Image (cartoon, grey):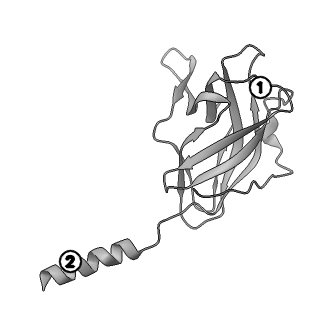
């Protein structure tokens, strides 16, 4: 009897749908490198979650670089801002958003396989803890001012596919 209940409980658990990040939209993405000869670059955007469950961005990849990492800036004890990798990822709350902005959280491209020329498009795969991948295109914008976040008058909804 106990075995039957246990097996039924296991079957019920596996029958539940996986939590997916279907409500995630990417708004206002752009990428840049500091110089034409840079070996690194960064990408910024707003991740907006229209879904009922929080999602966690845990990684990214692109053919444009050998590695793409999630990074943020923190102030050390001496008051110096330092960039560090965020291995736990970024949470996008249900019905909320998470901004990837200059001077804060961002995608870091390390070991560039190509130059980031103004007007180029980078293909990037965002990986979510929930098992979903989102394919996006990020335009390279070397002319954007650092304080772009003050105006969000337009948005770009990038379609995504799940692998």
Is residue 102 among the parts visible in the rendering? Answer: no
Where residue 6 sits, quadrant-wise, is bottom left
Circle 2 residues within 10 Å: few <14, some 14–19, many ≥20: few
Where residue 150 sits, quadrant-wise, is top right
Residue at the bottom extreme, as displayed: 1
Residue at x 77%, y 55% (from the top left corner)? 157
Helix, strand or loop at label 1? It is loop
Where residue 11 sits, quadrant-wise, is bottom left
Helix, strand or loop at label 2? It is helix
Quadrant where the N terminus lies? Answer: bottom left
* Residue located beneath label 1 in the image: 116
The answer to whether 8 is drawn above or below residue 133 in the figure is below
Q: Position of residue 114 (x, y in %)?
A: 72, 24
Q: Position of residue 87 (x, y in %)?
A: 46, 36
Q: Earlier in the sequence, mark 1 or mark 2?
A: 2
* Residue located beneath label 2 in the image: 6
Question: Looking at this view, is 102 or 156 the one in front?
Answer: 156
The answer to whether 8 is drawn above or below residue 94 in the figure is below
Labels 1 & 2 near each other (Cβ < 8 A): no
Circle 1 residues within 10 Å: few <14, some 14–19, many ≥20: many
Q: Position of residue 130 (x, y in %)?
A: 49, 57
Quadrant where the C terminus lies? Answer: bottom right
The answer to whether 20 is drawn above or below residue 47 in the figure is below
Residue at x 55%, y 56% (from the top left corner)? 132
Is residue 158 among the parts visible in the rendering? Answer: yes
Q: How many marks?
A: 2
Marks 1 and 2 sit apart, C-alpha to C-alpha, by 56 Å
């Amino acid at each position: 009897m106990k075995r039957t209940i246990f097996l039924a409980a296991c079957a019920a658990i596996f029958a539940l749908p996986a939590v997916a990040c279907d409500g995630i939209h990417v708004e206002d993405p752009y990428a840049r490198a500091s110089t034409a000869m840079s070996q690194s670059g960064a990408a910024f955007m707003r991740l907006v979650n229209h879904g009922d469950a929080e999602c966690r961005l845990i990684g990214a990849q692109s053919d444009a670089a050998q590695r793409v990492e999630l990074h943020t800036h923190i102030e050390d004890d001496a008051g110096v801002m330092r960039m560090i990798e965020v291995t736990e990822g970024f949470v996008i709350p249900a019905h909320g958003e998470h901004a990837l902005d200059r001077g804060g959280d961002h995608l870091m491209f390390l070991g560039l396989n190509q130059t980031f020329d103004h007007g180029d498009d980078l293909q990037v795969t965002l990986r979510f803890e929930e098992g979903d991948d989102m394919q996006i295109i990020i335009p390279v914008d070397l002319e954007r001012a650092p304080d772009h976040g003050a105006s969000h008058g337009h948005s770009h909804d990038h379609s995504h596919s799940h692998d």
